[in-house]
Image (cartoon, helix red, strand yellow):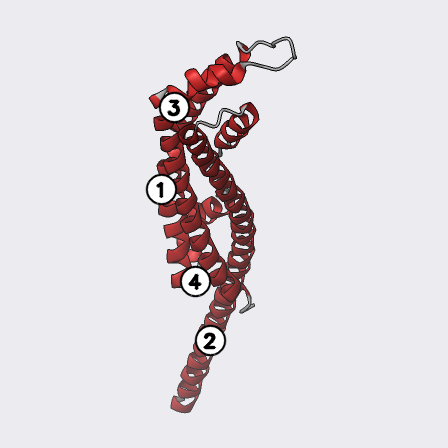
Amino acid sequence: MENKTSKYFKYAIGEIVLVVIGILIALQINNNNEVKKDRVFEIKMLKEVRKEIIKDTFYFNMLSKRTKTASNGAQNLINLIIQKKTNLDSVSKAIGDMSTGIVYLYHKGAYETIKSVGFDKISNDSLRFALTDLYDFSLPRTKQLLSRFEKTDKSITQVDRRFQILSIIGTKNLDGKITTQNNLKKSFFTDPEIVKMAINIRENNKSAFWRLQNIIEECTLVLQLLDKELKME
């Protein structure tokens, strides 16, 4: 009787052990599947973020060139005023270049998607920190710093308006030549506010150029981290 009871208990314990092992295996398999799903999602979103940063870097480079054009245009206008060169075409070209503006925009859809489900989805700590620093600090901060272009645009409008008024009142003489240059020499080139506004535009664009260069460099570093992470797959 005791042998039967002992065998029964051993059998029951064995069944319990098998059930526990089965549950543990099932939980492990389920956990592995969840990890795989999370990794698939992570890779997909990191690829999307990478695409957006590449687009933004290209766009920032274009903006950087435009700020340089504007800065050079402002400097050329200053030089023309100092040298009292009243050639209408040269002045018009300088003002046109100086009027080159920028619209600072960037993509953040993929990043916001990751943010909405939790940053813990990004397994690489260094990459997670780099992305949050870029999107939550550097990109918005750059937008704030470039907001000064609103004032710069007003300065450009004032310079251009004064130039247009002066060029419109020019008249032709008997030879068909425009006498606008004399008007420019007396009015446009002796207005101290014109030089002040041109200097303001030049300095703002120089500042914008270097800020854009900084953000391009940071985007490049984040792309390197992304490439390294994605090559692990």
**Mark toward the start of the polypeptide (2 vs 3):** 2
Q: What distance separates the C-alpha of mark 2 from that of mark 3?
A: 84 Å
**Mark toward the start of the polypeptide (3 vs 1):** 1
The quarter in which the C terminus is drawn is bottom right
Please name the amino acid that badge 2 sits on: Ile
Please name the amino acid that badge 3 sits on: Ile
Above or below — where is 180 with respect to 4?
above
**Mark toward the start of the polypeptide (4 vs 2):** 2
Please name the amino acid that badge 4 sits on: Ser
At horizontal 47% and vertical 62% (from top left) the residue drawn is 225
Q: What distance separates the C-alpha of mark 1 from that of mark 4?
A: 26 Å
> Residue 98, position in %: x, y?
48, 31
Q: What is the residue that sits farthest to the right in this orientation?
A: 175
Element type at marker 4?
A: loop
Looking at the image, is mark 2 or mark 1 nearer the viewer?
1
Q: Are marks 4 and 2 in contact (CB under 8 Å)?
A: no
Above or below — where is 119 with respect to 82?
below
> Residue 212, position in %: x, y?
43, 45
Q: What distance separates the C-alpha of mark 3 from that of mark 1?
A: 30 Å
The label shown at residue 21 is 2
The label shown at residue 141 is 1
**Mark toward the start of the polypeptide (4 vs 3):** 4
For label 4, the residue is: 123
For label 3, the residue is: 194
Q: Quadrant of residue 148?
A: top left
Please name the amino acid that badge 1 sits on: Arg
